[in-house]
């Protein structure tokens, strides 16, 4: 009667446990994600599948080398790899719960008993040999071990996705730092050309002043403009040094170890084709942060199962065999040998409030992970659309400033020629030169911003982690 009651109780508990924690199902992505991006109307992008090794589109061997160096030596990537190894070790530990647990112990002591405590005819001094083997195996009737393995697998997959995300960030930061180095070098060249042009104006104005065809104030004004433009160069050089130092850190070097070829880079690489962006559905499958959020949701869902399993009896099959003998003779004989075999049932019942509190906390964590997943999906789509929009407007701004620079350069040539002929005064020429200097600087800044917008778009697309490792 008692045996049947226990069997019925355990069977009902098993059915209840299975119903309480269903298997995990991945959340459904938004149906609108499969549609093309809004920003694909820009001719500088295409709907072709996004490219993993996107930095190769620049066709710059030096940039390719720097990215390979960053992938091999970046300290953030080393931290991410260490976290993967930690999660992998936790998975091995969770899987070990599927196997029997064993422990082996042995001891030997030499002792002497008092004469009062000794039996007549027995030695008062002797060895006591004690040894044994314990074996236990948990019968996973309610899924505690199974869900624990699922938790560890989810955590490992999330750590791997996090490492992919770090790789995406490292590649993007490396390319951005390199573009900053070259773009700032171009800004320095623009500032130096402007200073050289103003030096020429100073010589011309000085010569005109010497022959009485110009006023001393004209020389002072053009000299002040030249000094103003020249004063901007040290700040630009400091910005370039900062980009170089950042690039050194990203590639696992000290600033002194940065190759001279990088310091000498002065040309900003250009894309050889429109940026392939794919669609939203492919984006969500590729972005590491989305994959990490989904795996964390799976792990937190499994944690609910682990907590729920504690509501039901934990059953373990175990046994032990050992021996205790005086002296070293007949240790494994029938006399000193002892053994125990049988099941062990432990059950926190009827007070289960602490367990139910842990279940409630696990469900709350699962709800938070689901909300975080949904937010990550929306953020991924938002970042991609925002990056597409920023890139399109950066292109338009660069195109407009290029036209403005060309017009300012033409106006300066005409003003210089007319000023030599005495047809306009010096203030008109000075204003034209000031306008050209401003247009050159604005165009250089816009070109730099457009390069950064390209990198931001590539980063938002989430490429770079699935390509061949350098």
Image (tube, rainbow, N blue to C red):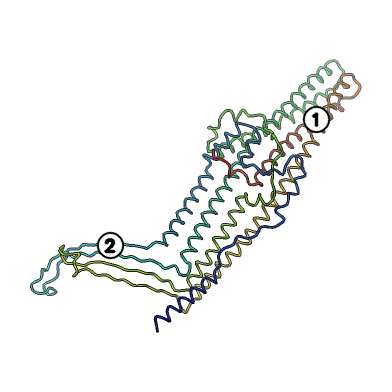
Mark 2 or mark 1, whichever is nearer to me: 2
| Nearest to the observer: residue 84 or residue 15 | 15
At x 59%, y 53%, the residue is 291
Q: Position of residue 340 (x, y in %)?
A: 29, 71
Q: How many marks do you count on the picture?
A: 2
Q: Position of residue 63 (x, y in %)?
A: 61, 34
Q: Are marks 2 and 1 in contact (CB under 8 Å)?
A: no
At x 80%, y 30%, the residue is 436
Give the CA separation, mark 2 to mark 1.
88 Å
Q: Is residue 402 above or below residue 209?
A: below
Q: Position of residue 268 (x, y in %)?
A: 67, 32
Local SS, label 1: helix
Task: Indicate which disc residue 305 carries.
Answer: none
| Nearest to the observer: residue 446 or residue 206 | 446
Task: Indicate which disc residue 105 carries.
Answer: 2
**How many residues crowd around disc 1 within 10 Å: few (fewer than 14), some, or many (20 or more)?**
many
Residue linked to disc 1: 436
Q: Is residue 123 above or below residue 79?
A: below
Local SS, label 2: strand
Q: Earlier in the sequence, mark 2 or mark 1?
A: 2
Q: Would you say 224 lies left or right of 334 here?
A: right
Q: Would you say 269 lies left or right of 423 here?
A: left
Q: Residue furthest right?
A: 423
Q: Position of residue 317 (x, y in %)?
A: 37, 69
Quarter of the C terminus within the rendering: top right
**How many residues crowd around disc 2 within 10 Å: few (fewer than 14), some, or many (20 or more)?**
few
| Nearest to the observer: residue 408 or residue 14 | 14
């Amino acid at each position: 009667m008692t045996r049947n009651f226990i069997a019925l109780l355990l069977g009902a508990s098993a059915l209840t446990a299975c119903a309480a924690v269903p298997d995990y199902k991945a959340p459904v992505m938004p149906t609108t994600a499969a549609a093309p991006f809004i920003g694909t109307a820009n001719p500088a992008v295409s709907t072709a599948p996004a490219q993993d090794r996107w930095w190769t589109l620049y066709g710059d061997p030096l940039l390719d080398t720097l990215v390979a160096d960053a992938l091999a030596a970046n300290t953030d990537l080393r931290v991410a790899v260490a976290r993967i190894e930690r999660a992998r070790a936790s998975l091995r530990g969770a899987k070990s719960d599927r196997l029997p647990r064993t422990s082996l112990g042995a001891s030997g002591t030499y002792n002497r008993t008092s004469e009062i405590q000794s039996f007549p005819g027995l030695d008062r001094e002797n060895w006591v040999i004690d040894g044994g083997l314990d074996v236990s195996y948990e019968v996973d009737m309610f899924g505690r071990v199974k869900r624990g393995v699922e938790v560890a697998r989810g955590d490992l997959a999330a750590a791997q996705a996090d490492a992919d995300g770090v790789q995406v960030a490292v590649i993007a930061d490396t390319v951005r730092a390199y573009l900053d180095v070259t773009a700032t070098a171009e800004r320095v060249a623009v500032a130096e050309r402007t200073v050289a042009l103003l030096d020429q104006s100073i010589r011309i104005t000085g010569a005109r002043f010497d022959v009485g065809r110009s006023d001393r104030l004209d020389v002072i004004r053009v000299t002040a403009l030249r000094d103003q433009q020249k004063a901007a160069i040290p700040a630009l050089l400091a910005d370039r040094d900062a980009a170089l130092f950042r690039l050194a850190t990203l590639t696992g070097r000290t600033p002194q170890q940065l190759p001279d070829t990088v310091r000498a880079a002065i040309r900003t690489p250009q894309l050889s084709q429109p940026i392939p962006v794919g669609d939203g559905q492919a984006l969500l499958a590729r972005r590491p942060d989305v994959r990490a959020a989904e795996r964390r949701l799976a792990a937190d869902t499994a944690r609910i199962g682990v907590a729920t399993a504690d509501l039901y009896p934990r059953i373990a099959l175990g046994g032990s065999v050992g021996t205790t003998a005086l002296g070293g003779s007949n240790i494994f004989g029938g006399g000193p040998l002892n053994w125990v075999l049988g099941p062990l049932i432990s059950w926190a019942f009827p007070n289960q409030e602490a367990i139910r509190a842990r279940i409630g906390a696990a469900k709350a964590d699962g709800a938070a992970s689901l909300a975080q997943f949904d937010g990550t999906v929306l953020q991924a789509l938002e970042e991609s659309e925002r990056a597409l929009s920023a890139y399109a407007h950066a292109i338009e701004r660069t195109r407009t400033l290029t036209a403005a620079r060309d017009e300012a350069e033409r106006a300066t040539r005409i003003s210089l020629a007319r000023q030599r002929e005495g047809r306009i005064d010096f203030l008109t020429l000075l204003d034209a030169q000031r306008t050209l200097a401003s247009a050159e600087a604005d165009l250089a800044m816009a070109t730099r911003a457009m390069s950064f917008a390209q990198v931001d778009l590539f980063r938002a697309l989430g490429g770079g982690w699935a390509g061949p490792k350098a």
